[in-house]
Image: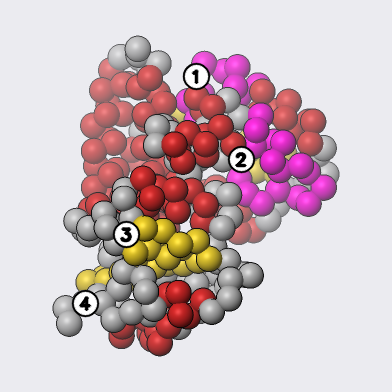
Amino acid sequence: MNKLILDGKAVAQEIKSNLKKRVESLTEKGIVPCLATILVGDNPSSETYVRMKGNACEKIGIKSIRIQLPKDIQTEELIDAIQELNNDDAVHGILLQHPVPSHIDERKAFEAINLKKDVDGVTSAGYGQTALGFGEYPSCTPAAILNILKYYQITIEGKQAVVVGRSPILGKPVSALLLNENATVTTCHSKTANLPDILKQADIVVAAIGKPKFIQGDWLKDGCIVLDAGYNKGNIGDVDYESCYNVASAITPVPGGVGPVTIATLLKHTVDSAEKTLT
């Protein structure tokens, strides 16, 4: 069986190459696409993600603003900071880095983001629009997974897809996106009984459960497509890569799979938002 490694770096590079031209065109018209990232506290992983996103912005000409807030900030103070960005016409996208400290009402903070600037697809209205098929900015990791499948011209329509995970910014929206592409979708989670039996039926598997090396190769159907959206300590995904590689016809590596495309998708949504100011 021919084995296809789904190289997220190649997908991301194509997206960013196209974006660079669009950013140049906007800049000539006096508009510099701008992404504002809010970081609460000093979580080292979050610091790394924010830095990566900022670097990615700068490489293609997007302005990156970093808002660093103390870890003991209260929910209402965080919302005030979000509202300032909502009211700033020079800001086209707002990203609240997840997770925030536990005393903050994260959902309330997400809901404060203006839908037109919700480039990471975290608001309930954005999710609802995505599920109904007309969302402009779906959550970036789910959108990245669809981008990878389309880049490699992998058929989604008519396929059995199993999503393992049901988080509001990954499992649920990717299930909706796959359903909108006419896949038959089963969403599994920590309470699902007989998960290996369900996975044996899947043509497309999306791993988004947040447990390192959780999904095993002998749970999978021969020739299935595996998209690993997990990112755990030590650069380890949610699937046991070696055993799943032996069974799958195509698989994303970790790192270098879904991650780079997620960042590229965030940049694309920011540029999309900036372009809307011209209309």
Mark 2, other Cα within 10 Å: few <14 / some 14–19 / many ≥20: many
Residue at the far left: name it. 2
Element at badge 4? loop
Identified at 28% across, 65% down, the residue is 6
Say which residue label 3 marks. 8
Considering the image in quadrants, where does the N terminus appear? bottom left
Sequence order check, earlier mark of 4 and 1: 4
Mark 2: which amino acid? Leu
- The three-letter code of the residue at mark 3 reads Gly
Foreground tag (4 vs 3):
4
Q: Which circle, 1 or 2, is nearer the viewer?
A: 2
Marks 4 and 3 close (CB-CB < 8 Å): no
Residue at coordinates 64% horizontally, 37% vertically from top-left? 110
Q: Earlier in the sequence, mark 2 or mark 3?
A: 3
Q: Residue drawn 45% across and 53% down? A: 175
Q: Nearer the viewer, residue 133 or 59?
A: 133
Residue placed under numbered mark 1 in the picture = 90
Q: Amino acid at mark 1?
A: Ala
Q: Which mark is residue 96?
A: 2
Q: Position of residue 144 (x, y in %)?
A: 38, 51
What is the secondary structure assignment of the residue under circle 2?
Answer: strand
Label 4 vs 3, first from the N-terminus: 4
Residue picked out by circle 4: 3
Q: Quadrant of the C terminus?
A: top left
Of callouts 1 and 3, the N-terminal one: 3
Dividing the picture into quarters, in which one does residue 256 lie? Answer: bottom left
